[in-house]
Image (tube, helix red, strand yellow):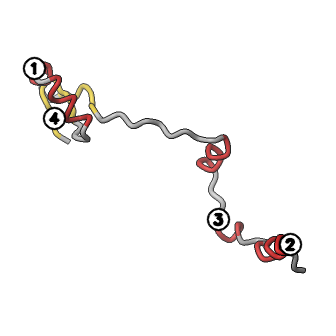
């Protein structure tokens, strides 16, 4: 990621904002000291309540498979 001096960033503000919006983020620095990172804004995804739980929990595949055949048979009317 490129670094731009704060004075240069001030002079080129609108141009740099457009570049960041298009995906070309940058760091504004005062000399060698980084001050801020400018990145394009990503709209947060809308989550249903269940999606939030899914994001926090991982169920191993072997647990997901437990009883799968029996449950499928019940839904299909088989024994």
Number of the label disc, if any, that sits on residue 60 = 3
Residue 49 coordinates in the image, percent (x, y): 66, 40
Q: Nearer the viewer, mark 3 or mark 1?
A: 1
Residue 19 coordinates in the image, percent (x, y): 19, 35
Dot 4 surroundings within 10 Å: few (below 14), some, or many (20 or more)? some
User: Residue drawn 64% across and 52% down?
Assistant: 57
Q: Secondary structure at mark 4?
A: strand
Q: Which residue is mark 1?
A: 11
Residue 75 coordinates in the image, percent (x, y): 83, 70
Q: CA distance from mark 1 to mark 2?
A: 69 Å
Residue 53 coordinates in the image, percent (x, y): 65, 46
Q: CA distance from mark 4 to mark 2?
A: 62 Å
Nearer the observer, 50 or 29: 50
Q: Which residue is mark 2?
A: 74
Instruction: Report if the CB atoms under discs 4 and 3 are less than 8 Å apart.
Output: no
| Placement of 46 over or under 77, stated as above or below | above
Q: Earlier in the sequence, mark 1 or mark 4?
A: 4
Number of the label disc, if any, that sits on residue 3 = 4
User: Residue drawn 31% across and 35% down?
Assistant: 40
């Amino acid at each position: 990621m490129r670094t731009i001096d704060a004075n240069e960033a001030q002079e080129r503000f609108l141009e740099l904002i457009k570049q960041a919006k298009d995906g070309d983020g940058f760091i504004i620095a005062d000399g060698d000291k980084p001050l801020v990172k400018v990145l394009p804004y990503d709209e947060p995804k809308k989550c249903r309540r269940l999606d939030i739980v899914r994001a926090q929990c991982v169920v191993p595949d072997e647990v997901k498979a437990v009883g799968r055949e029996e449950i499928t048979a019940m839904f299909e009317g088989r024994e």
